[in-house]
Image: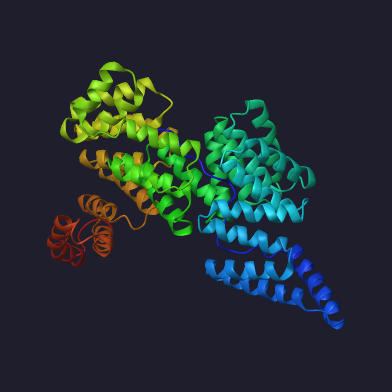
Amino acid sequence: MTTAKGSFIFATGRTVRTLQFSAILVMMLLLAAHAGAQGEPDQAADGVALFQKAQDLHEKGDLKAAIELYEKAIAAMGEFPEAEYQRGHALLALGRDADAEKAFRRAVETRPDWTLALANLGSILVGKGAYAEAEKLLLKAVSLDDQNTLAYSALVELRLRSKAPPEELKKLLAHLTLLTSGVRSTSAAWAARAALERELGQKPAAKASLENALALDPKNRFALMSKANAAMDEGDIRGAEPLVRSLEAISPAAASTKALRARILYANGKPDEAIEMLDMIADPTPEVAELRDRMLLSSTENPADLEKQLAKKPADPFILGKLCRLYRLKDPAKALDLCRRASEAEPSNLGHAIGFAAALVQAKRYTDAVDLLRRLEAISPDNVTIRANLATALFQLKRYAEAKTEYRWLIEKQPATSIAYYFLGISHDQLTEYADAMANYQLFLRYADPDKNKLEIEKVNLRLPVLQRQIKEKKGKGN
């Protein structure tokens, strides 16, 4: 499945109050006071006051009201690039990319050497595929300011989208390595560095860079998006889900957010909903269009239809992978063969190998599953789907001490995952670690869904009175 990439430069719903802005505003107020002293209309002062109110609303998240005041401030001043710039960010946050582009254009036209405006306009143009114009703007931005991480981030995206040669990517990576080596490194620089490292095959380094980006800014949209796409590429749907939820909380209207949700819907066997989600994107990028076309071509959930396609293309990893998923529950033995063939056809796609391991679990070949999952775990230690399947296989083999380690890891990564507490509680219970079993059963009851986990809730409620008595009688380990 083609990864739908989004833009590096994103609005967060917050204004950019820089020292540069403050100096400009002070100058405006002085000019306004001078104009007022000579009896001229005090339009400049009105414009500045409106701009300040707009920024306050912008910071509070009232974007529509902020945009209205930015526009009034621009009307009062005639030319007001700072207001155009902030208006552009507010429009981006609302998913109005075309209007945001116009705002950034006006900011650049008024102040041609303003590197922040150049970087943001360049980023939007990269997102819409206008690479030639974007390159001119971004190269100008970095020539004026070689510390402009926003411009470098967009330039990285441009190089990746236009399939630049590895030598060119390595030069960019060298510069971003310098930008991230100082104490004032930014989240945007780390995220851009991660994208280059991943493209150059340096996956462990890319993961570390993404963690650095998110440590500096947990709401960095590109870092969240990159991490979610990487998880999806590795077949880690469980790991991608909370990242996509975070993106949906920050910018639900963004095309990149919708594309990621579509990928998850599709991976969960909901192709119609996935395509409907992609259809909601007003101006799809070429990557989104390709993603949608791929989903449409293989939207059928009928194994017989897919097998006819497979007869024509027996080594197509996409068809093999989909049949692997469809047969995993109803015919695990058949799924095993399909998953294995998918993995052999596309060995670089970790998702196929994970599918094979999941099919082994469904076929109750737990020992084989553990062996494969341990190897996959060494390759991708932070893959939630791998660890969840490994926990299940170890639990079914009654290797409770090892299963505990996996369930604890899962809970640490996703604390609200109720079923993990349930199985961790049983593991402690089977090892006669009754106090720990009690604690995890109680956490399970706190987080469990009354409908979805009805059976497990009943089992825990039946077990608790006996367990309480055993703890009271100081039975079990540690008592």
- At x 63%, y 67%, the residue is 71
Q: Quadrant of residue 395?
A: top left
Looking at the image, residue 441 sits to the left or right of residue 385; the answer is: left
Q: Is residue 280 visible?
A: yes
Q: Nearer the viewer, residue 26 or 446?
A: 26
Q: Is 32 drawn above or below residue 397 in the view shown?
A: below
Q: Is residue 239 visible?
A: no
Quarter of the picture holding the C terminus: bottom left
Residue 50: x and y, percent? 66, 74
Looking at the image, residue 331 sits to the left or right of residue 339; the answer is: left
Residue 347: x and y, percent? 40, 23
Q: Nearer the viewer, residue 95 or 467?
A: 95
Q: Is 170 drawn above or below residue 112 in the view shown?
A: above
Residue 141: x and y, percent? 74, 46
Q: Count the labels in the image.
A: 0
Looking at the image, residue 195 sits to the left or right of residue 464; the answer is: right
Looking at the image, residue 263 sits to the left or right of residue 150; the answer is: left
Residue 388: x and y, percent? 31, 43
- At x 61%, y 43%, the residue is 125
- At x 25%, y 45%, the residue is 400
Pick out the residue farthest to the front. 40
Q: How is the image coloured?
A: rainbow
Quarter of the picture holding the N terminus: top left
Q: Quadrant of residue 16?
A: bottom right
